[in-house]
Amino acid sequence: MSEQTINESTEKKSLNFIEQIVVNDLAEGKNGSKVQTRFPPEPNGYLHIGHAKAICLDFGMAQKYGGVCNLRFDDTNPTKEDVEYVEAIKEDIKWLGFEWGNEYYASDYFQQLWDFAVDLIKEGKAYIDEQSAEEIAAQKGTTTQPGTESPYRNRPIEESLELFEKMNRGEIEEGRMVLRAKIDMAAPNMHFRDPIIYRVVNHPHHRTGTTWKAYPMYDFAHGQSDYFEGVTHSLCTLEFVPHRPLYDLFVDWVKKGEDLDDNRPRQYEFNKLNLNYTLMSKRNLLILVKEGLVNGWDDPRMPTLCGFRRRGYSPESIRNFVDKIGYTTYDALNDFALLESAVREDLNARATRVSAVVNPVKLVITNYPEGQVEVMETINNPEDPEAGTHTIEFSRELWMEREDFMEDAPKKYFRMTPGQEVRLMNAYIVKCTGCKKDDEGNVVEVYAEYDPDTKTGMPGSNRKVKGTLHWVSCAHCIKAEVRLYDRLWKVENPRDEMAAIREEKGCDALEAMKEMINPDSLQVLTECYVERYLAEAKPLDYLQFRRIGYFNVDKESTPDHLVFNRTVSLKDTWSKMNK
């Protein structure tokens, strides 16, 4: 076997199954050997982390194989859709690092879809049904029993045409009538049992206003929209597997039997992105927002892309995470810790290192000259030599972390304790000499003496001590608010747990959610101090608070009131706590 053949074989094995399909289709010359995909969100909410997987696949395949990915809003349900969501979706896609070729809307095709539906009625392939939703569901049968035909299935074509027009003129109230495709009520695939393809919605549309009263169903609009746009690969999640035959049938019908074998959209399915300790249904996320259980769609505890962005996740970390978990034909529950690991890995390479004290106690260097201030140089990112440096002031009185002092410490305690030496990061080695307490026994000041020959960079600085602590100068720091975020849910699988609670207690989704909310998902610390270098920090600046974690400037932060969000801790402590 030649070296070229070996390389080609290795590369072929590394492709995910969707990409392998694309490669094969190109090799066979299907669709003129081109790739055109689409990302088709419904503008009824904000995108969440699950959508990121579809975005990466849709845009990634087009990008890699010289094609184009279009953005198409599935705006066929005006009661739930809003321009706010349209704009938010665009922002999220761009933030992830992708650009669409064209911007389309399902509503662009309302006239074409209407004309197609009229043709189906005329051809005897569709009819107006006046049964209730409950009656239609009952007469569809089961997976083991065939359905029974609607009493309206063979109504005269002219009558169906007239009623269809009335539906769209607003003369028929919602729920009174639907248009159904006439296929096969005994088909093994339940989706073939005369599916509903149009219903009445008496609500203004965000783009078309009151022009339409009859709206197409998703299964009817989706495949045809793909065909109208020239989509070659229609990539969907696994729940659409049983919908694929209907997708193909409607595409065949819209072309009236013309040969489409080498020029048609083809649907392929992949697994969803599921995360433990996460609830991703837009319906449930909307409840959280409307009921005030979170602070909006971009609350950093939300699994929305705007929530992750506000929390400080980088788009690269999300794309890397999606790449790590891959694409398969079976659903799995991914560990949230894997996402956090991808974030740590990415931020380690890009975050600026700064000093911040979130639970302060004063440290007084008793033998350091009063009024003296030294300017220490600190590296912005040891992983990136080109990231440069900045300076931080050192003085007699410092803030240190309260957790870094223990008056009566065990033997292997390597932080601040009487009689023990530690290094103050980028500064000196100091020896703790004691502490001062208030009337309740709380430590209010820690005392230490410094060794002037141990300044970082000096010959004496080579003396080794086991502990290194961070600090900020009391006279040269800024007070800040720090928000520590954790998982929103205290149960590993909130979707299944919510269903179990609702069944057991007969309560609604909101009450079930209240039982599952993690009460410690947000801790607000208002007495924190950060170095002055952060006075100019802005949202989306990636920061590492030394020895604490990765942080981001919150959008509510102002020069007079700095606010920082914890993106993720330096190490995975959650997994250990919950074993």
Image (spheres, rainbow, N blue to C red):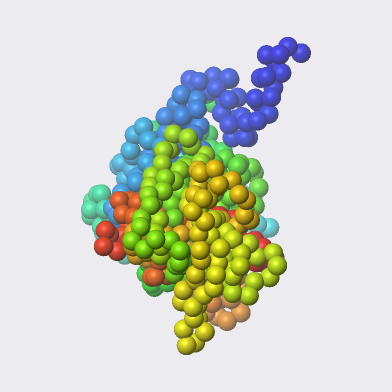
323 horizontally vs 6: left or right: left
User: x%, y% of residue 23?
Assistant: 58, 25
Q: Residue at x 61, y 67 (%)?
A: 419
Q: Residue at x 59, y 61 (%)?
A: 421
Above-or-below relation of 171 to 375: below
Above-or-below relation of 296 to 221: below
Report whether residue 109 is seen.
no
449 horizontally vs 276: left or right: left
Above-or-below relation of 481 to 205: below
281 and 550: which is toward the camera: 550
Q: Quadrant of residue 368?
A: bottom left
156 and 135: which is toward the camera: 135
Q: Quadrant of the C terminus?
A: bottom right
529 and 497: which is toward the camera: 529
User: x%, y% of residue 44?
Assistant: 37, 56
Q: Quadrant of the N terminus?
A: top right
User: x%, y% of residue 345?
Assistant: 55, 45
| Residue furthest top as drawn | 2
Report whether residue 3 is seen.
yes
